Amino acid sequence: MESLNSKIDYPALGWDASFGELPTPEAGVAARVVTENRGHFVVLGPSGESAAVLAGALRKNPELRPAVGDWVVMGFEGCAGVPTIHRVLARKSKLSRKVTGRMTREQVVAANLDTVFIVSGLDGGRNLNLRRIERYLVFTWNSGAVPVILLNKADLHGDNTAFVREVEAVAGGVPVQAVSAHDGTGLDFVRSYLGPGRTIGFVGSSGVGKSALTNALIGQVTQLTGDVRQGDLTGRHTTTRRQLLLVPGGGMIIDTPGMRELQLWSEDEDLNDAFGDIAAASRQCRFKDCTHTVEPGCAVKGAVDDGDIQTARLESYHKLSQEIEHLAQRESYLGRLEEKARGKTFGKMLKTFNKTNRKQGGTL
Ligand SMILES: Nc1nc2c(ncn2[C@@H]2O[C@H](COP(=O)(O)OP(=O)(O)OP(=O)(O)O)[C@@H](O)[C@H]2O)c(=O)[nH]1
Ligand SMILES: [Zn+2]
């Protein structure tokens, strides 16, 4: 049988060697998730776009579930040949948010992005928030994708150099570009991150122009953009906005509802990536575990006194560092709870096992 896998242009859809070899026809077909809506999936695979369901193991475990942008291996089950997702291939990058509520859990809101554009708006003083940009930087470094900063609505000002410089001062070497979704300024810069197989996404507060930028890049609504009318295999039909959009000329934009509600999910390491100046200064602190708050001989506070690091930046660092610490504590608490729960289940299993085996003369 000829491999179904050869019928789509995998590299153009973002497939590369990091995902390994394409599965053999016996093992299934590889497809990319283009839409997820309350557990219903649409994938783009060898036979075009189709609705797909999750295999039982994935349904039961939220941590194994695919996100938009994921590469999955599918099979076709039963005589109806229902497309069924069996596993998610290891991700190159993932944007996650912590699921709110009493339990802190990671939820992947987009996968396999190459570049994440952090968007701010140049329309009004309060919108250009350096602290928020720092926060998004920490966040994006954590994803494994490469961050780039965009200052949108450049058309509102004659000269944006001062804004760009101001942001560059906190960007730690990440490129900063003034753009306009309205007059097209800087869009070629954004396009330089696209091209066949490249996947990008926009994050940033509401109203900064993420949709406007997406529309400007997609241009005319092509056959492969816009809404998908999705039969969910139960006969019900829903219309869902497509979340992985193909850009004419090559490349893809991921835009999921979850990406618009990002909350901090990261680790200390990422904090040091985003605050390279503070990390560098801290190597000169007298104490190795200096918290840069009350310790004598703190080189970071020294740098603040010398005017090399702004007070607000150090405050922002402290705030983020506390949040990460808090998150780490909740995570380990959650881990302990899970362990306990697993222990209980295991204990129960052992009891049942011993009960049945006692009759046969052996226990564990
Ligand atoms: N002047 C100007 N206005 C813009 C530009 N881009 C977007 N806007 C306006 O800013 C407003 C918000 O734009 P959206 O694209 O909806 O912003 P968003 O980031 O997608 O917002 P959410 O969907 O709430 O996350 C709209 O009124 C746009 O017309 C721009 O380049 N210049
Ligand atoms: Zn210090």
Image: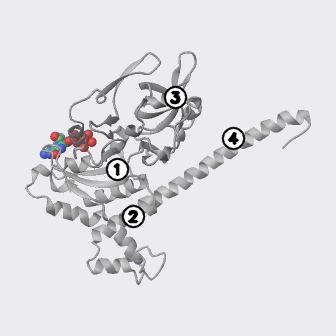
Q: Which residue is mark 3?
A: 3
Q: Which residue is mark 1?
A: 115
Give the number of the disc on residue 345.
Answer: 4
Q: State the separation of the CA atoms marked 4 and 1.
A: 42 Å
| Secondary structure state at the residue bearing disc 4 | helix
- Of all residues, the one furthest to the front in this rendering is 2
Nearest to viewer (mark 3 / mark 2): 3
Mark 3–mark 1 contact, CB under 8 Å?
no
Depth order, front residue of 241/354: 241
Task: State the residue at coordinates (20%, 47%).
Answer: 187
Residue 356, percent from left and from top: 84, 33
Depth order, front residue of 277/76: 76
* Disc 1 packing (10 Å; few <14; some 14–19; many ≥20): many
- Is 278 above or below relative to 220? below
- Is 255 above or below relative to 307? above
Give the number of the disc on residue 273.
Answer: 2
- Is 340 above or below relative to 285? above
